[in-house]
Amino acid sequence: MTIGEISWQRAGSYGSETGYYYGFKLYMGAAAGSELTNTFAENYVHGTRTLVYSTAAQQMTALPDRWMTVLLDTPYYYSGTEDLIIELEWVGGSNMFYTYMWDTGTNRGLMNKSDVGSPTGILLATMSELMFGPASVLEQRTFGSIKAVWAD
């Protein structure tokens, strides 16, 4: 599957409807193991960490229990056989966009709120619920627009 978008589900009415994150980057890659270590770089299979989305200012917004989707700049091919790492990085922001979390039972979350340049973080057994969408080969148009183009 080629992943073209990632979505997070807002956790009810917790936090803000909109969160702002500056210097926002999203990386994906193959995990070196089924459980994370506290050192970010050790968790990736060497050479697989890929920048798939970057923006100076990311707005995360959704009504309670709705999904917020990011369309990737660079779709990521995922074979479905290895564990996948989703890494978010930002250097500041305002408000908090809370997402539903689930307890994975093992260390599958790694967080570092204080220093984006630090090589280590705090291990967690929880992570955000995510939804992945395929990369579309069609241009972003409505079916009505496509039908009108074909009718000519």
Image (cartoon, rainbow, N blue to C red):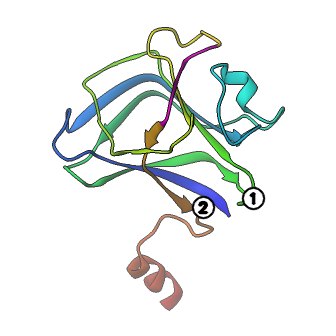
Tell me the CA gap for discs 2 and 1: 19 Å
| Residue at the bottom extreme, as displayed | 151
Q: Secondary structure at mark 1?
A: loop
Q: Is residue 121 magenta?
A: yes
Q: Is residue 131 magenta?
A: no
Q: Secondary structure at mark 2?
A: loop
Q: Is residue 114 above or below residue 124?
A: above
Foreground pick, 121 / 21: 121
* Horizontal relation, residue 76 to residue 148: left or right: right
Image quadrant where residue 67 sits: bottom left
Foreground pick, 72 / 141: 72
Q: Is residue 21 above or below residue 30?
A: above
First to last magenta residue range: 120-125
Residues at discs 2 and 1 in contact (Cβ within 8 Å): no
Picture coordinates of residue 28 (x, y %)?
65, 40
User: Badge 2 is on which residue?
Assistant: 135
Give neighbour class at mark 1: few <14, some 14-19, many 20+ (Cα, 10 Å): few
* Horizontal relation, residue 140 to residue 100: left or right: right
Q: What is the tally of numbered marks visible in this picture?
A: 2
Picture coordinates of residue 45 (x, y %)?
80, 36
| Residue at the left extreme, as displayed | 13
Residue 81 marker: 1
Please name the residue shown 29% across and 34% down the image: 97
Q: Is residue 34 above or below residue 110?
A: below
| Residue at the right extreme, as displayed | 46
Foreground pick, 57 / 80: 80
The residue under label 1 is which amino acid type?
Answer: Thr
